[in-house]
Each structure stands twice: as C-alpha cells, then as structure tokens.
Image (cartoon, rainbow, N blue to C red):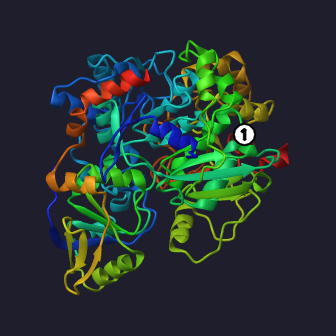
Amino acid sequence: MATTLFEKVWNAHVVQSIENGPQVVYIDKHFIHEVTTPQAFAGLDKRGIKVLRPKQTIATADHNVPTKNQLLPIKEALSRKQVDTLIENCKNHNIELYGLGHPFQGIVHVIGPELGITQPGLTIVCGDSHTSTHGAFGAIAFGIGTSEVEQVLATQCILQTKPKKMRINVDGVLGKGVTAKDIILYIISKISTSGGTGFFVEYAGSAIRSLSMEARMTICNMSIEMGARGGIIAPDEITFEYLRGRKFSPQNFEEAKEKWKLLKTDDDAVFDMEYNFDASDIEPMITYGTNPSMGLKISEKIPTNDDAGLEKALDYMGFEKGQSLIGKEIDYVFLGSCTNSRMEDFRQFCLFVKDKQKAANVTVWIVPGSKQIELQAIAEGLDIILKDAGMELREPGCSACLGMNEDKIPAGNYCVSTSNRNFEGRQGQGARTLLASPLMAAAAAITGRITDVRELF
Amino acid sequence: MEKFTTIQTTAVPLNMEDVDTDQIIPARFLKATTREGFGDNLFRDWRYNSDNSLKEDFVLNNPTYSGKVLVVGKNFGCGSSREHAAWAIHDYGFKVVVSSFFADIFKNNALNNGLLPVVVSPAFSQKLFSEIEKNPATEIKVDLENQTIEITSTQEKENFDINPYKKTCMINGYDDIDFLLSLKDKVEAFENKSH
C-alpha cells in the first residue's frame, strides 16, 4: 500500500495501539528547556522514579536567559530560579545540560540540528510548539505540553492520535529578495491559523527542494502557526550534506544515508488534503495584524472587509483598513528566534547592512541562535559589520521573540521581527509586532521604516 | 487527575475567535515551577490594566456572568503548546470550555488536566451565546457519560464527540503515565528490536 513519508516514520515508532484511543509512540529524541519541565520533573520526583533514557534527553536553557553578560548570575529572580531548577533536575537525572556557559548552548531548535542530533526518520518532541522545526530533516517532530513531557521523561513514549495528512506543494522559482520566511508567511495567509489543525503537513515541490536546510527549518518552524501538528520535508542530498561530519551525526554515515534515502512519500500515496502554490506569486511579506495569518505582500494594502477580528487587530496595531504599510516608521528591529537566527539569516542581514548606517529612530537587537553561531559570526567578521552599522551582536537565547528575559518591546512600539508570532502583547505588554524575513528586517533597520527591500537592491 | 462528573452551571461567554495562548496566559507568567496559582493570571492583560486596575468591560470582570463553563469562539487556544493555558483556565474555576473549534495542542492539554473541551456545531455555539446574553442565569448541563450538552431552560441539546480513551480517563480520573509505566517491558522490547 502506498504510504507517505509521515506514515513510514510514524508506523515504525508505534509500540502499541489502544482500541478507540491514541497510539503509544516511541520517542527517539526528547529536547527539554527550563520553562516546560519543572512541573514534569516534580511529577517524576513525586512518583519516586528517574528519567528513563537520560542519553536521549537533550537539555538547554534558552527562554529566560539574558542576551548580554550571560556569564553573570541572572538578575530576574523567577528566571534565575527556573534556570537553576533545570540545572538541578538535569544533575539529579544524569542528563547532560547545554546550559549557559556551555559551548553548545542556544535555542533548543537551533542546537539540535546544528549538532547533528536531529536526523531523518526520528521522532522528536519538546515542550515547545516550534519543535516542528526539526521536521525539515524528514523527522516527525512536534510540540507537547508539560504533562506529556512528564510522559516522555518517565517512559520515553507518548500517547498520540495519528493526525490527518496534508501536502503543500510550492513549485516554481522564487523572485529576488523572496526567502523561506516569505514562503511560510504567504502559505499561512492563504490557509489561516486553523487551516492545518488536525493535520501533519508535508512540504514538497521544486521551490521547497531548492531550499537549504536552514531555509527548510524556517518553513517547518512555522507549521504550528497554521494549526498543524507539525511539518516535514523529505530528506535528500542537501539534507545528507548538511549532516555529514556534524558532532552527533551517525558514525557509519554512508550506511545511515542509505536508510535515509528510503524516507519519502510513495508516488501514488494519497493525502487527506493538498494545496498547490506558485513560487512566482510570492513577494516579501509583512504582517499587519495580531496573528501570523494576518500577513500581506509588501506591495499590497491592508484588507477592508467587515470583520470584528480584523477591526480589533487593527485597533491594537494602530493601523487602518486599506492602508499600505510602506513608509510606516518603526521603533525596533529584532533579528533572532528559532525561526531566523542561523548563519544564513545573519549573512543575509549583514550583507545588506554592510557599509550602511542604522536609522536613528530604531533600536536593533541581533540575537544569534546558539553559541556556535555567535562564534562563527565573529569568525566571519559579521560582528564588525554590525558594529560599523551601529548595531550589536548579542548572545544566544529566545530573547524578544516572547520577552521572557529583559528584551521586551515597550508598549505601543513597533517591532519588525524575524520571529514567529505577532499575538497581542507577545513581545511585551502592548508591543506591536510585524513579522518579516531577515532581509525585510535589515531594510527596516536601515531606513527606520517599513520598506520593500527589493527597492534597495 | 480529578474525576469529571456531570455538571450543571451558569456560563461565562467570551465571544471572540482565534483566542491565542499568549492571551490566555502571557509568557511572563510561565516562570513558575509549580502547577498552582495560574488562575490569578488567566487572561491577565485583558482583565487588568498595566496599573493593575480592573478592565471593567472584560467579561470575567462582569459580575453578571459566572459559572464553571466557559463558552468561546472558534479556534480557541491557538498558538503555543503551553499547558499553563489549560492550568490557568482550570485553576480559575472552569471545568468545561465550549467551542466550535479548538486548536490541537490546547485540546490535548485540556483533556490531560480534567478540563473538558466540548466541540459543538457553529449553530449551537451561536445559540449558546445568544441565550446567555438574553439571560445570564442560563444553565448549561454537560454530561460526559452521555456526551451531551444542554441548555436546560430550553432543553436544546447537542451530542459532542470525544476520544473514547480520553473519555474513560476523564470519567475515572486516570493518568496517562500510570498506563505508560505499565508498558515498560513492551518499550524495552521495541528498543531492542529497532536498535
């Protein structure tokens, strides 16, 4: 019977099925961080049991950490307590922690792939909805709640109902200045924040195939924003070359590669739902509202339909129906988050701002996805390029994506952000987020206004 | 987990669509290391101004409405996987959330915490909102065993779907982890087979 890539990986991990219920799915890699684990570990301690597979548990501190002076004690008491709790829990359960000060520390969904821990055909979970990022490698990866984190810590398994299958094809050639971030914002604007609910999405098509691993990660990362359980892209030579020689890639690489080549959807497999998009229709995108589906092409104007949700969003954002966003003055630019904080994002941003000056009215926060990326950026002289442009390379963490650390956007301020959510108050109480690609963020940093980056090439 | 029994109470109407988890429980409240107290911060930024005074026009601050049932618009709970959202709603005092459509991860988190997500048709959802608005003392009866939700005054009723396994767990207060722990041998057998 013809099966999809998702089904092949899922079926290979089912330990047991419950009649009229979920299946027991084995988890190969469990990523953990400080925010969604304290209560889970407390649950284990209460039962008097230890983490079953500490070697398959990968820990980092990312949500709460400062992005400057990371080696000093964390100032905010609750943040410090949460990070300390993770340190203690990892010690008690023999889990290796890539915490502050460790060379592998960083945003959980950045470090997994860069260390070669994320591989094709694996099942990966984490108490964070952007776990879908790892699907870029042909893995089944999804976000879970704290109780499910406890399930996995205790038994290395999780109870899950198999989702329905969706395929999104993007074919054709991308225009100049159009990036993976624009592709996914475009897709979400077409499908809505609930259009993917109940489905696991496979991304396919020539435009997807043409993307680098980092670009594929950006796409899979935002699968949750259309309500999907996760996103997956079939592995290919681009995937294999990315993984070759990484710290935790398989020792018998060629042997592993032969197995990975089998991981693809059969030609005659059928999906429950399928979409087709033309890459040439995609332009640099920007969001105008308070959920990720409220995005438009930079050349378009804000919709004018009679809709209470739209009106509430525009009221919060201080925008009006029928307006163009081009020329709007902004206050902050944030380059970072698990969506766009990898080397290619940094190189693109720096290539654009090189020999230019940051606009006086903008504060720019540049936050690398991991310590390794921070050091690589310095090795490539990107920190100098940024400094000369009036910007500063900070240290890794989730930072302003959700403002759990000090990097909060003040009320009423506009921030062009390369992160993944523009919900009310996400980046700080009253903060106004505009989601965009690193290129669009770079353009806004230089002009101090929302700009069509293609005009400045 | 507490056992879920039939409930009959008044309801609080939050007639908004796409209510995301950042509104239900803002990120700055996720720094807790225990499960208690999240109810205080439920819909924090919709309930309180930045000076901590109450926002009078928000439904939770309106004494006209009360009860253990929260009726909401479609796509409730979209966004983050934070289980803290379910904890906040349950800790505040709600036992049931009614909507025509729930985001996946939120629905799962609710079920894992004795907070029953009841999916109704868009038409029934509209009916609930208009009845409650007409008469805030309207009582809603939710019977998990029979999978029905009823407006007691008009006796309008609808059946709702729920995964049979999750239903058994909620009715009996069963814990997924106890079940998974009982499978230890099977898990080890699986590991040996695949490695």
Q: Residue at x 53, y 35 (%)?
A: A139
> Crowdedness of circle 1 by 10 Å Cα count: few (<14), some, many (20+)?
some
Q: Which residue is mark 1?
A: A209
Q: Residue furthest top?
A: A251
Rendered location of residue B17, percent (x, y)? 45, 67
| Quarter holding residue B33 | top left
Rendered location of residue A188, percent (x, y)? 60, 56
Q: Residue at x 41, y 65 (%)?
A: B101
Q: Is residue A122 left or right of residue B147?
A: right
Seen in the picture, residue B45 relative to B135 is either above or below; the reply is above
| Quarter holding residue A59 | top left
Q: Is residue A81 left or right of residue A8?
A: left
Between A410 and A205, the one lying in front of the other is A205
Q: Is residue A129 left or right of residue B150?
A: right
Q: Count the numbered circles shown.
A: 1
Q: Residue at x 55, y 57 (%)?
A: A272
Callout 1: helix, strand or loop? Answer: helix
Q: What's the residue type where badge 1 is placed?
A: Arg
* Chain of the residue on which disc 1 is drawn: A
Between B111 and A71, the one lying in front of the other is B111
Rendered location of residue B123, percent (x, y)? 40, 80
Quarter of the image with the C terminus of chain B is top left
